Image (tube, rainbow, N blue to C red):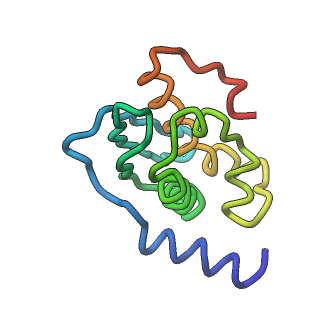
Amino acid sequence: MSDITFEIILDHYRNPRNYGELGDATVKVRDSNPLCGDVVEVYLKIGGDGRVEKATFKGRGCAISQAAASMLIESIQNKHVDEIVKLGKQDIFDMLGMEVGPARIKCALLALKALKTAVYGFLGKKMDEEELS
């Protein structure tokens, strides 16, 4: 990992974007990684046209999980739910600027799992675990 990548991850960890509860959220999902204790809550306000009008998150955990959440939530503002369901683990790795080792994959993908669970719940569908591959 380059120094720049490391600094970007630390910046998102220390200064998360779109952090906090969203009182008028259309959907809210909390997920955790029991192996390491990471927790992420995703809040989405979705308009009638299926676009994310506002997205925020709250959480605690390692730098990878929280930076990934911050980057992901920042990237989906004003996106249509159809675009969000197409996101995959490689999108997260690309945002982070690195491949994540086996011990940290669940940390990196926690926010994506919560986000997709929220979107699928909004759509009235159930997410298949293979969605994260």
In which quadrant will I find the C terminus?
A: top right
Q: Residue at x 36, y 37 (%)?
A: 46
Q: Which residue sits furthest bottom?
A: 3
Q: Front-most of 78 and 87? A: 78
Q: Which residue sits furthest left?
A: 23
Question: Horizontally, is 122 left or right of 115 in the view?
Answer: left
Q: Front-most of 20 and 124? A: 124
- Residue 128: image quadrant is top right
Residue 75 lies, in percent from the top left, at 54, 57
Residue 52 lies, in percent from the top left, at 42, 43
In which quadrant will I find the N terminus?
A: bottom right
Q: Front-most of 52 and 102? A: 52
Residue 124 lies, in percent from the top left, at 45, 15
Q: Residue at x 51, y 46 (%)?
A: 79
Q: Residue at x 48, y 46 (%)?
A: 37
Residue 97 lies, in percent from the top left, at 74, 66
Question: Horizontally, is 34 left or right of 108 in the view?
Answer: left
Q: Eyeballing the image, is 79 above or below 62?
A: above
Question: Horizontally, is 6 left or right of 90 in the view?
Answer: left
Q: Which residue sits furthest front?
A: 49
Q: Residue at x 36, y 47 (%)?
A: 53
Question: Horizontally, is 90 left or right of 13 in the view?
Answer: right
